[in-house]
Amino acid sequence: MVSEGWGPFNDSLKYGYGTFEKPYLGEPFVEWEKQTFNYDEGVQPSVAALDNQLFLKVHKSQWNSHLWQSVNKSAYGRSMEPLGDPYKYEDNGSGNPVSLQLNNGFILNMFDDRNSDKAWFKTGTLNSSHGTSVDWTSPNVSDFEGENMDVVQLQNGYLLSVHQDPNSNKIRYSMGRYKYEGSDRVVWWQYF
């Protein structure tokens, strides 16, 4: 779990840990640790679980439209140790970045565009030489308008994006699929 700091002048970003519990009787729940930890400064944080106990943390700068990322390793299930310094990976995003690792090992990152109502995305892979950064493709514009999105990959490999319609404030969703034929494109369809 990642979150922004609390208070009007607090730009700290925090993370915390929880354990998924599934009792024999009753509903599953997450048992959250009571302590949170500062890890950076910024706004609109997001975290994606990668392979080998790695995490990709992305956030927007508190000062401008730059998006920042860092690769971190879980240490004993209680802390995140950075594997390198956070670095800027996008100049033109207006924020709300969200990332996830796809079934094929690629990483998908989506974010709002500050100059249009379109959602943008990049795909990338963990750098194989040192594993402390993600090698991203050039950003691509999606086929739908949306902001404040979230995206998940379903068991069948399809992507589901839920987002706010910038013209009506209604919640919409789109379905898509990552193209594996040497392309770095996500094909979106079914806009609702």
Image (tube, helix red, strand yellow):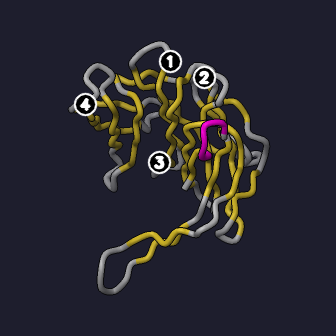
Figure quadrant of the C terminus: top left
What percent of the width, then of the height, locates residue 108? 50, 39
Q: Which residues are magenta?
A: 5-9
**Real-space Cα distance between discs 3 and 4?**
27 Å
| Observer-nearest of 101 and 12 | 12
Q: Nearer the viewer, mark 3 or mark 4?
A: 4
| Observer-nearest of 14 and 56 | 14
Q: Main secondary structure of the magenta part?
A: loop
| Observer-nearest of 176 and 72 | 72
The kind of residue tagged 3 is Leu
What percent of the width, then of the height, locates residue 57? 62, 46
**Real-space Cα distance between discs 3 and 2?**
26 Å
Report the residue marked by disc 3.
Answer: 102
Report the residue marked by disc 4.
Answer: 170
The kind of residue tagged 1 is Arg
**Real-space Cα distance between discs 3 and 1?**
26 Å
Label whose residue precedes the other's in the sequence (3 or 4): 3
The kind of residue tagged 4 is Lys
Q: Residue placed at 28% from the left, 35% from the top?
A: 174
